[in-house]
Each structure stands twice: as structure tokens, then as C-alpha cells.
Image (cartoon, grey):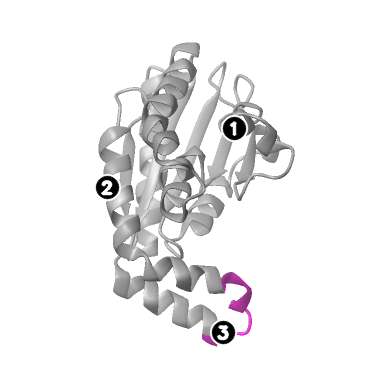
């Protein structure tokens, strides 16, 4: 699938075990591999730390007609880095405007932008964590860090709510995906992307 002259950025954020990977696999299952790239985002490496924190995302922007999918994103600045103390208060507080400015530049250049927050409740996360821990084929998916993050649920919830409110814009809106039901969540992601393409391509 190639989209004529339409570069597209699709962002996935969400709670641990919310189903980001599964949603991305369903989204890309029928796409031409030459037309998209998936970028899993983790802590910046030694090279990336030498530059502004947004630099490593600019370098992965897609060319016209292609799709860049980010599995976690620049919003780590106002979530993980905020909660864990990796960014100073003034750094993550000013990041809301920096991020909106960046996304606005992309939109003005002609990018289609979709941002998904996959929401599950605390009980569903515990069920999925337990399933992973008890299944030898899935144990690699669960780490001590996942459990530590779960202990900070309330702090992350506050950060997520502020992020959604302060960075939801007309050119890069958030779509909150109710993720307790994986089937429903994946359908909502697909429907949202189809509607975005129809709008941008003038259907």
C-alpha cells in the first residue's frame, strides 16, 4: 500500500501490556513492506543523547507515500522521563509546546498524523502480566521494570491525562483506544486510520 504523495506518521502509546504490538501487527499485516517502517522506541543510545531529544524522531520521518509507525514515541519525555526523573522539571514542562510545534511543522509540510493511546484498566493489566509470567512462551515479554512501573500507576495516570489534554490538536489529535478487549481495540485503530486516509486523500 502506497499513498500518493502522502507521508504518514502513526504513533502508539499506552500502558504496558495494552496491546501496542498486536495493534501494529494487525495494522501492517496487509501492507506492502516497502511502504512502511516500524520504529520501536526505547531509551536513547549514546549517539542520540548528544542531540536534542526530538532529533532521533526527525531522522525517521517517511518519504512521500510511505508510513512511519512509532511503537512508543517522543511523548516519553512527558511520561517516563518525567516520572523517573530523567528530565528536569523545566525540561518536561516545556516539552508540551516543543512537541506541538514539531507536529505542527509536520502537518504544515503535508504529513498525515495519527496518535493512539491504548487504555486498559489496572485489573486487566495485572491479568495480562500474570498470563505472561505463567506462560513460558511469553515470559520474555514481562520484566521487573514492568512491575516497577505498575507500582507507579497513579503517577503515570496523572502524567498521561495531562499529556492527552495538552497535546491534543486539530492537526495531530489523540485517539483513545479502549483496550481491555483486544479485538475491539484493533478494529478501532484500523477504522481510525482508514478515516484519516479518506479525509487526507479527499474521498
Q: Which of 151 and 135 is in front in this view?
A: 151
Res. 188 in view: yes
> Which residue corresponds to mark 2?
161
Q: Nearer the viewer, mark 3 or mark 1?
A: 1
Q: Distance between the residues labelled 2 and 3?
A: 32 Å
Q: How many marks?
A: 3
Q: Residue drawn 60% across and 50% down?
A: 42
User: How many neighbours does mark 1 have within 10 angstroms: few (below 14), some (14-19), or many (20 or more)?
Assistant: few
Q: Give the range drawn in magenta.
A: 134-143
Q: Distance between the residues labelled 1 and 2?
A: 23 Å
Position of 6 relative to 25 (above/below): above
Position of 201 relative to 8 (above/below): above
The magenta stretch spans residue 139: yes
Q: Residue drawn 49% across and 69% down?
A: 146
> SS class of the residue under badge 2?
helix
Res. 1 in view: no
Q: Which of marks 2 and 3 is in front?
A: 2
Q: Which of 172 and 81 is in front in this view?
A: 81
Q: In this view, does 163 lie to the left or right of 88?
A: left
Q: How far apart are marks 3 and 1 (CA)?
A: 34 Å
Task: Name the main secondary structure of what is drawn in magenta.
Answer: loop
Give the x, y percent position of residue 139: 60, 78
Which numbered circle lies on residue 9?
Answer: none
> Which residue corresponds to mark 3?
135
> Which residue corresponds to mark 1?
57
Whichever of callouts 3 and 1 sits on the residue coming sooner in the sequence is 1
Position of 64 relative to 74 (above/below): above
Choose top left, top right, bottom left or bottom right for residue 54: top right
The magenta stretch spans residue 148: no
> SS class of the residue under badge 1?
helix
Q: Quadrant of the N terminus?
A: top right
Choose top left, top right, bottom left or bottom right for residue 175: top left
Amino acid at each position: 500500500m502506497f499513498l500518493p504523495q502522502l507521508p504518514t506518521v502513526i504513533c502508539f502509546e499506552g500502558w504496558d501490556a495494552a496491546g501496542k504490538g498486536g495493534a501494529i501487527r494487525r495494522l501492517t499485516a496487509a501492507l506492502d513492506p516497502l511502504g512502511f517502517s516500524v520504529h520501536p522506541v526505547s531509551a536513547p543510545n549514546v549517539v542520540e543523547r548528544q542531540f536534542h531529544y526530538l532529533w532521533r524522531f526527525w531522522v525517521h520521518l517517511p518519504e512521500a507515500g510511505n508510513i512511519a509507525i512509532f511503537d512508543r514515541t517522543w511523548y516519553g519525555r512527558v511520561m517516563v522521563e518525567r516520572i523517573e526523573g530523567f528530565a528536569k522539571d523545566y525540561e518536561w514542562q516545556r516539552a508540551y509546546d516543543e512537541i506541538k510545534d514539531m507536529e505542527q511543522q509536520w502537518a504544515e509540510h503535508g504529513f498525515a498524523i495519527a496518535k493512539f493511546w491504548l487504555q486498559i484498566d489496572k485489573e486487566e493489566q495485572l491479568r495480562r502480566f500474570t498470563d505472561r509470567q505463567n506462560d513460558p512462551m511469553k515470559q520474555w515479554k514481562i520484566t521487573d521494570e514492568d512491575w516497577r512501573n505498575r507500582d507507579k500507576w497513579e503517577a503515570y495516570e496523572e502524567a498521561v491525562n495531562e499529556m492527552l489534554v495538552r497535546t491534543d490538536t486539530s492537526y495531530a489529535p489523540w485517539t483513545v483506544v479502549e483496550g481491555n478487549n483486544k479485538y475491539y481495540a484493533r478494529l478501532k485503530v484500523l477504522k481510525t486510520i482508514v478515516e484519516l486516509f479518506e479525509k487526507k486523500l479527499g474521498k
